[in-house]
Amino acid sequence: MFKSKFFLFLLVVGLFGAGVSIARELRSSYEVSMQIRQLQSQIQELENHNTELAGLLTYLESPEYQEQEARQKLNLQKPGEHVVILPEVEVPAKKIPTNPTLEVELKSNWKNWWNYFFSNS
């Protein structure tokens, strides 16, 4: 029976089927492991984000932040403090003096060099 061609054919077909089945399982296992890695990286990112949010929440609940917000938004002050409001002072714009040397500085660079080497004055 083991030497018959039919048995050999069935054995080859069985091995081929087993090989295909193993290949499918390996592919499926690889895809699952890739998904696990991706989900683990997402978990790490979310944990980092949660840590940042917890730090922000701690800061927002701190008395220093609450005092700062009360001062800025509600215009509150501590007992004994005095608020001083300074008026805005307008600074007059400076006039640019009309000076012949200034005109030389406003010329292009090559004109300044030309005048330096070839002008009589």
Image (cartoon, rainbow, N blue to C red):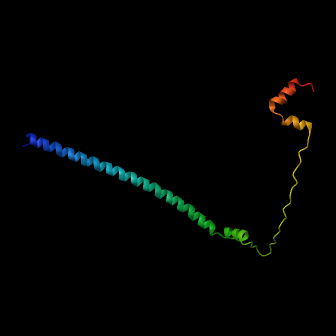
Q: Residue at x 87, y 34 (%)?
A: 104
Q: Residue at x 53, y 62 (%)?
A: 50
Residue 82 lies left or right of residue 68; in this view the side is right
Residue 36: % across, % down: 40, 55
Q: Nearer the viewer, residue 19 or 87?
A: 87
Residue 100 lies left or right of residue 59; in this view the side is right
Residue 88 lies left or right of residue 1; in this view the side is right
Q: Residue furthest left?
A: 1
Q: Nearer the viewer, residue 118 or 50?
A: 118
Residue 10 lies in quadrant: top left
Q: Residue furthest bottom?
A: 79
Residue 24: % across, % down: 28, 49
Q: Residue at x 19, y 44 (%)?
A: 15
Q: Nearer the viewer, residue 114 or 38?
A: 114
Q: How many marks?
A: 0
Relative to residue 81, is residue 20 depicted above or below? Answer: above
Relative to residue 27, is residue 113 depicted above or below? Answer: above
Residue 70: % across, % down: 70, 71
Q: Residue at x 17, y 46 (%)?
A: 14
The image quadrant where one finds the C terminus is: top right
Relative to residue 102, is residue 29 depicted above or below? Answer: below
Relative to residue 54, is residue 101 depicted above or below? Answer: above
Residue 49: % across, % down: 53, 60
The image quadrant where one finds the N terminus is: top left
